[in-house]
Image (cartoon, rainbow, N blue to C red):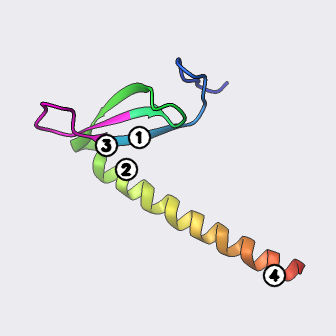
Amino acid sequence: MLSKCGFCKGTIFEVVTKEPHGSQFKVCFVQCNGCGHPIGVIDYTNTSTEIDGLRKQIALFQSEVESKLSRLEHKLQ
């Protein structure tokens, strides 16, 4: 069973770091990727390093997948 956004029923979520107006610190919002509706908040100081590491791993994985797809496409041609 997938979690769904309570606003648009989307099933893809993201973590976005923001500094709320009037605040002196950053927080990480867990929000719907489709409509931006927030569903939770995570403390920035405990997660920012972890999130940055995950983003780098995702970017590396995406690059590897794109490279492999390109080689496969070349072989199929």
Residue at 66 percent across and 67 percent down: it is 65
Q: Tell me whether the residue at label 3 lies in contact with that at label 4, contact meaning CB atoms closer than 8 angstroms.
A: no
The residue pinned by badge 1 equals 15
Dot 1 or dot 2: first in sequence order is 1
Q: Tell me whether the residue at label 1 lies in contact with that at label 2, contact meaning CB atoms closer than 8 angstroms.
A: yes
Q: Secondary structure at mark 2?
A: helix
Q: Tell me whether the residue at label 1 lies in contact with that at label 4, contact meaning CB atoms closer than 8 angstroms.
A: no
Binning the other alpha carbons within 10 Å of mark 1 as few (below 14), some (14 to 19) or many (20 upward) gives some
Q: Which residues are magenta?
A: 17-29
**How far apart are the alpha carbons under marks 3 and 1?**
7 Å
Dot 1 or dot 4: first in sequence order is 1
The residue pinned by badge 4 equals 74
Q: Tell me whether the residue at label 2 lies in contact with that at label 3, contact meaning CB atoms closer than 8 angstroms.
A: yes
**How far apart are the alpha carbons under marks 2 and 4?**
34 Å
**Image position of 68 (left or right of 32):** right
Q: Position of residue 2 (x, y in %)?
A: 64, 27
